[in-house]
Amino acid sequence: MSSRTVIRNGLVVTASDEIHADVLIEDGRIAALAASGTPAAEAWTAERSIDATGKYVIPGGVDVHTHMELPFGGTFASDTFETGTRAAAWGGTTTIVDFAVQSVGHTLREGLDAWHAKAEGNCAIDYGFHMIVSDVNEETLKEMDLLVEEGVTSFKQFMAYPGVFYSDDGQILRAMQRSADNGGLIMMHAENGIAIDVLVEQALARGETDPRYHGEVRKALLEAEATHRAIRLAQVAGAPLYVVHVSAMEAVAELARARDEGLNVFGETCPQYLFLSTDNLAEPGFEGAKYVCSTPLRPREHQAKLWQGLRTNDLQVVSTDHCPFCFVGQKELGRGDFSKIPNGLPGVENRMDLLHQAVVDGRISRRRWIEIACATPARMFGMYPKKGTVAPGADADIVVYDPHAEQIVSAETHHMNVDYSAYEGRRITGRVETVLSRGEPVITEREFTGRAGHGVYTPRSTCQYLN
């Protein structure tokens, strides 16, 4: 039985176009677009009709940086694949790419299998995986080739967290050389973790234990230094590089310089760096612990340079790095020692709305909103045009978005499995109304109508920005 849905009278916004058009969906895919009110559009019949008058019809968001159920600092991220993907849908995101973790002494395959087991049958929306490479050796390098062939085409390495995820420059170079051959993309957490550990030890010895010191020891210059080093290692290897969660203006400058040199270097930032600052880390009592993440929040003056980077395309993607830990019982593990606060913020539900607020505020255009949140992440990680656009042949991952609705962000009303909001009390103009995932309604006029297990695993091709 084929099923048809038509979305009428909306403004279809993609990364390249804005058109008043009706959208015909057939069997989970977009079948056609036609100008609203034309005979072609009027002739369409469908079992389900959605009126989008006065609304935007946009591609579902593609969040290529989430950590559901991530083990970290003796605890686990509080969102499961079920709760996290449901919250993502509420926020207008219809695809996530999460990180499977290789533990030291284990194979990539073991890590990937463990993450498949966590996600399978539990997701409300479609999902893919990147692979965290924690242990570079000859076997790992061979496995990277196999993973690329089966659709896991990106590998994350860490210059931070010695003793946990850390890779030294030699290990990073070997992985980059391998990705230069197999077409994979190295994603880098660029912070000088060895130097940071010295500064952490010195701060604690001075009795500087409050959350704000987390930001003070993880210096912007050490992010910039590591970003520079990662770029030059990638250049030596002849490999592309994607730098995750860029937070500092000095790191943006390194990316801009590399791109001006013609290197295949890409940068991602996150809403927390665009909207929050060290003012939050310094909130009284232990409240600042809610905002502990790495890279850390920066002083407010960095925000303007991040927005500028998004406008000039020196930063291409906004993802969330969604990695929630509850304040009670999890963030509290670091009372009296900021280095024991689990690193991570909740955000998978807030990204599309916060970026729409940036459109309202005149920081970015509507099309740029869709570009940095949907189209570019899909292209960067080999999912376009199946994901990230509204066009014939694409998966019918579509959001009907009310650009005039007003909301106040709050833990009282969000759907993430975490006891606080990083954006508590913030007023936002714009709100998700209806969400389709492969043509199935997951959110219907602000009601959850999806189900665990609807979301399917999505193998990916290699980065679509490379020759």
Image: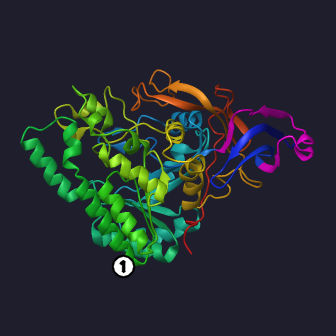
- Provide the residue span drawn in magenta: 30-59
- Determine which residue is flagged by label 1: 236
- Classify the position of the N terminus by image quarter: top right
Identity of the residue furthest to the front in this view? 362
Display coloring? rainbow
Residue 105 in sight in this render: no
**Residue 261 falls in which quadrant of the image?**
bottom left
Q: Is 149 on the left or on the right of 277, as rendered?
A: right
| Vertical side of 111 occupied by 181: above or below | below
- Give coordinates of residue 6: x percent, y percent: 81, 39
- Give coordinates of residue 175: x percent, y percent: 39, 70
Identity of the residue furthest to the left in this view? 206
Q: Is residue 57 magenta?
A: yes
Query: 10 Å neighbourhood of mark 1: few (<14), some, or many (≥20)?
Result: few
- Classify the position of the C terminus by image quarter: bottom right
Q: Is 418 on the left or on the right of 405, as rendered?
A: left
- Give coordinates of residue 424: x percent, y percent: 41, 27
Q: Amino acid at mark 1?
A: Val
User: Element under label 1?
Assistant: helix
| Vertical side of 179 occupied by 328: above or below | above
Q: Nearer the viewer, residue 34 or 334?
A: 34
Residue 200 in sight in this render: yes
Identify the residue at image location x=54%, y=71%. 466
| Vertical side of 190 occupied by 443: above or below | above
Identify the residue at image location x=87%, y=44%. 41
Q: Is 345 on the left or on the right of 348, as rendered?
A: left
**Residue 236 falls in which quadrant of the image?**
bottom left
Count the numbered circles shown: 1
- Give coordinates of residue 314: x percent, y percent: 44, 61
Identify the residue at image location x=32%, y=43%. 293
